[in-house]
Amino acid sequence: MPDVKLTPEAQQMLIQHQTFQQQLQTIMLQKESISGQSVELEMALTELKKADAKEEVYKAVGSILIKSTKSELEKELREKKETIEVRLKTLDAHENKLREKMKQNQEKLEAILKNIDNKESN
């Protein structure tokens, strides 16, 4: 295949597509990290539910443990889990929009490349 000379528009779209791919990769990494946090919180809530209401419970704050009550800790963990779920929904929406932009960009780029190929064939 001969070297294809890309138009400035095609070059720009190719750069934009690469940028979209990098952004998508970042989103996927963030989702993976946040999903892990969600699983950890769910496990902590499950274990906390097993504890008696009068049992001493502790929460980690930095490198120390601080005494708390079961109800306070459950409330705090549920709030953290809700925050994480909202963040995951936001990342999902961002991922979907980005994938749609990538699809549109790719279709335009393919049309430009096809047009360039047709001109070279003639």
Image: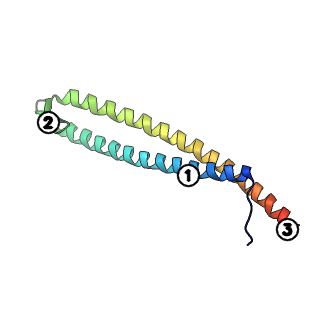
Taking the image as shown, residue 96 lies to the left or right of residue 58, namely right
Does residue 80 sit above or below 5 in this rendering? above
**If you read the primary sequence from the N terminus, does the residue marked by circle 3 or circle 1 appear first?**
1
Q: Nearer the viewer, residue 34 or 19?
A: 19
Find out whether the residues at labels 2 and 1 contact each other: C-beta distance under 8 Å.
Answer: no
**If you read the primary sequence from the N terminus, does the residue marked by circle 3 or circle 2 appear first?**
2
Distance between the alpha carbons at the discs numbered 3 and 2: 72 Å
Which residue carries the number 3 mark?
121
Answer yes or no: is residue 95 visible.
yes
Distance between the alpha carbons at the discs numbered 2 and 1: 41 Å
Quarter of the figure that contains the N terminus: bottom right
| Disc 1 residue type (three-letter) | Gln
Q: Which mark is residue 21?
A: 1
- Taking the view exactly as shown, the residue that stands out farthest to the right is 122
Residue sitting at 59 percent across and 41 percent down?
Answer: 97
Residue sitting at 14 percent across and 36 percent down?
Answer: 65
Distance between the alpha carbons at the discs numbered 3 and 1: 31 Å
